[in-house]
Amino acid sequence: MVLPPPPCMYCTLQNGVYISDEDGSVQHLVDLSDKLINATCYQGFHCGRHPNATSELSKIGCCYPCSFHQSCPEAAISLNHPFTDNVCPGGYTCDPSPKICSSGEICFNNKRLDCQSVQAKAKEESFGTLFDGMYCEEGTSVMINCPTGYYCPNANDKRACPSGFFCPMKVSK
């Protein structure tokens, strides 16, 4: 038995916003000739292609709910696929619009983690000093090795190596 598709709340694919894959910025798409100019989705949903789209229906879509790792402000559009578009970019959290992650935090999959807590948890879970000598700069989704010429006493702090000392990469003291 084939189940019918779920009911579709119609929307337009010609007007609204989408999240840039490059920098997480909110981009606007507007076609003033669209007769459905006010048919947009609520926050938490985005407009994706109608499952039975034909060339006549190519500008009409359905409102699909966004998943936890997507960013869906009001009037969000899915340009390619409702499950892979509008993903909150690494280094940002989205609620619903992207906001850059602060220094001392990592952000990925729309989650924010405190880097010092990550370092402490690694020690607690018997990974030792695995994350020592690493830090988290603004807008990152990963902890970064402290570069040569610097030392990182904690995940929030990158300091220049003192005069008369050599600081190789990933030094914490």
Image (tube, helix red, strand yellow):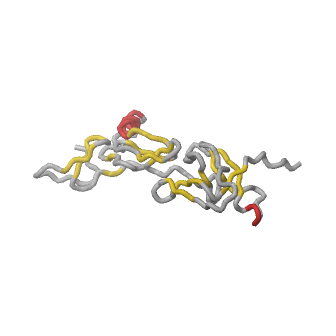
Observer able to see residue 126? no
Number of numbered markers: 0
Q: Residue at x 61, y 61 (%)?
A: 31
Q: x and y percent of residue 55 in the render?
A: 75, 66
- Residue 150 pos. (x, y %): 22, 51
Please say if 60 is above or below 116: below
Residue 45 falls in image quadrant: top right
Residue at the extreme right: 1
Residue shown at the point (69%, 57%) measured from the top left: 35
For image coordinates 75% across by 56% down, the residue present is 51
Seen from the viewer's position, the closer of residues 72 and 2 is 72
Position of residue 133 measured from the top left corner of the image (x, y, whole percent): 29, 46
Q: Residue at x 34, y 48 (%)?
A: 137
In the image, 102: left or right of 96? left
Q: Between residues 99 and 38, which one lies in front from this camera angle? A: 38
Query: What x and y, as percent, mark residue 99?
Result: 44, 46
> Farthest residue toward the top?
124
Image quarter where the C terminus lies is top left
Asked if residue 132 lies left or right of residue 38, the reply is: left
Please indicate, yes or no, whether residue 135 appears anywhere in the rendered image.
yes
The one of 115 and 41 positioned closer to us in this rendering = 41
- In the displayed structure, does residue 79 sit left or right of residue 104? right
What residue occupies the far left of the structure in this picture?
Answer: 164
